[in-house]
Image (spheres, grey):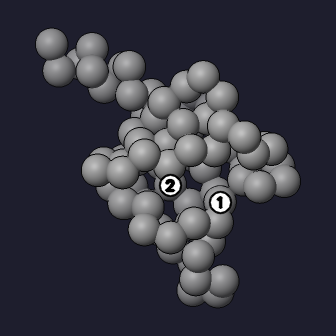
Amino acid sequence: MKNHDFKGQTNNLNYVFETSAEETTITAYGYDVKQGDRIEIDSYTFEVQQVEYYAAPSDLFRASLSKFNEIEKGKN
């Protein structure tokens, strides 16, 4: 498991963070983001549920996220 820090970056410039009632996603540039990794945005931590890389550019990915705190509560 790896932590990926997006806290110092700008939404809609360095990454696109989208949330709805159905899902939370991030589209960004980066290598080696995998299922189970954590992504930090502002003061929130999310866990990567699923990740897909685009063919070109090869470092562009889209990941489905869930809030890390919610995952931890669900395990208790």
* Callout in the foreground (1, 2): 1
Pick the front one: 23 or 58: 58
Query: In this view of the protein, can residue 23 be seen by the observer?
Result: no
Tell me if 52 is positioned left or right of 16 in this view.
left
What numbered label is drawn on residue 28?
A: 1
What residue appears at the point 50 percent right and 55 percent down from the top-left corner?
A: 63
Q: Position of residue 51 (x, y in %)?
A: 43, 61
Pick the front one: 51 or 37: 37
Tell me if 49 is positioned left or right of 43 in this view.
left
Query: What is the quadrant of residue 28 in the picture?
Result: bottom right
> Going by the picture, which residue comes out furthest to the right?
13
N-term mark: 1 or 2: 1
Query: What is the quadrant of residue 42 in the picture?
Result: top right
- Helix, strand, or loop for circle 2? strand
Q: Position of residue 71 (x, y in %)?
A: 31, 25
What numbered label is drawn on residue 63?
A: 2
